[in-house]
Image (cartoon, grey):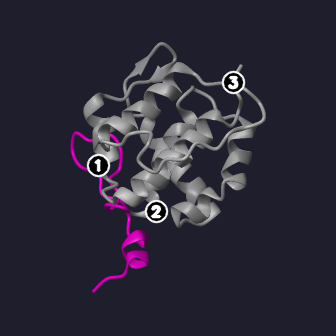
Amino acid sequence: MMTLQARESFSPINYPGRPLRAYPTDSPRAKARLVVLALLADGRMDAAELDGLAKHRAFDELGIARDDFFQVLYDFCADAAGLPEGRGSYLMSPALLESLFAEVCSTEERQKLVRLIFDVIRSDGHLAESEARLFWKALDSWRLRLDDGIEYRPRAAAFK
């Protein structure tokens, strides 16, 4: 039997017609990519968002080393270069986005990711429409509700 760590060390699978690499279900890399998506949802990566990853112990929560997380970020950006462009950003089809959410099946991991995504998108004090859409898409895809054990952690600064 192969361990999770051994499976993670293999190259991800690229399927014809799928512009982004596939990761094993519930793998740290699959979960990290969803946090990367939250980091980039507003079209830019803010230093406060990166600081928020450390503050919320995101790497530990995801089960991934910091360097491996940034490799997932790099790989995502490389893959995204093959996506269609629109209004200055890359476009992800609803089906592609669903396939990324489908790579996480564990309810506990989904709840943890929704909290991390929420923490990331609000860490810069500004909630962009694209960030809000990603958050609600995660809830819809995973059939979660805000009261499904997803605790709100108040911040001192309000959204701008």
**Residue under the image location 53 percent in, 67 percent down:** 63
Residue 15 magenta-highlighted: yes
Residue type, label 2: Pro
Residue 8 appears in view: yes
Q: Give residue 42's position: percent from left, percent from top.
A: 57, 26
Residue 30 appears in view: no
Q: Give residue 62's position: percent from left, percent from top.
A: 52, 61
Which residue bears the numbered disc 3? 159
Question: Where's the N terminus, which quadrant?
Answer: bottom left
Numbered mark located on residue 28 in the image = 2
Q: CA distance from mark 2 to mark 1?
A: 14 Å
Q: Give residue 107's position: percent from left, percent from top.
A: 35, 57
**Residue under the image location 36 percent in, 73 percent down:** 7
Nearest-to-viewer mark from 2 and 3: 3
Q: Earlier in the sequence, mark 1 or mark 3?
A: 1
Q: Earlier in the sequence, mark 2 or mark 3?
A: 2
The rendered magenta stretch, by its main secondary structure, is classed as loop
**Could you classify mark 3 by the number of other residues whose Cα lies within 10 Å: few (under 14), some (14-19), or many (20 or more)?**
few
Which residue bears the numbered disc 1? 102
Please report the bounds of the magenta region as a residue range: 1-26
Query: Which of these two is toward me, 124 or 13?
Result: 124
Numbered mark located on residue 55 in the image = none
Residue type, label 1: Ala
Query: Which of these two is toward me, 119 or 24?
Result: 119
Q: Is disc 2 placed on a helix, strand or loop?
A: helix
Vertical position of residue 60 compared to residue 107: above or below: below
**Could you classify mark 1 by the number of other residues whose Cα lies within 10 Å: few (under 14), some (14-19), or many (20 or more)?**
some
**Could you classify mark 2 by the number of other residues whose Cα lies within 10 Å: few (under 14), some (14-19), or many (20 or more)?**
many
Residue 38 magenta-highlighted: no
Nearest-to-viewer mark from 1 and 3: 3
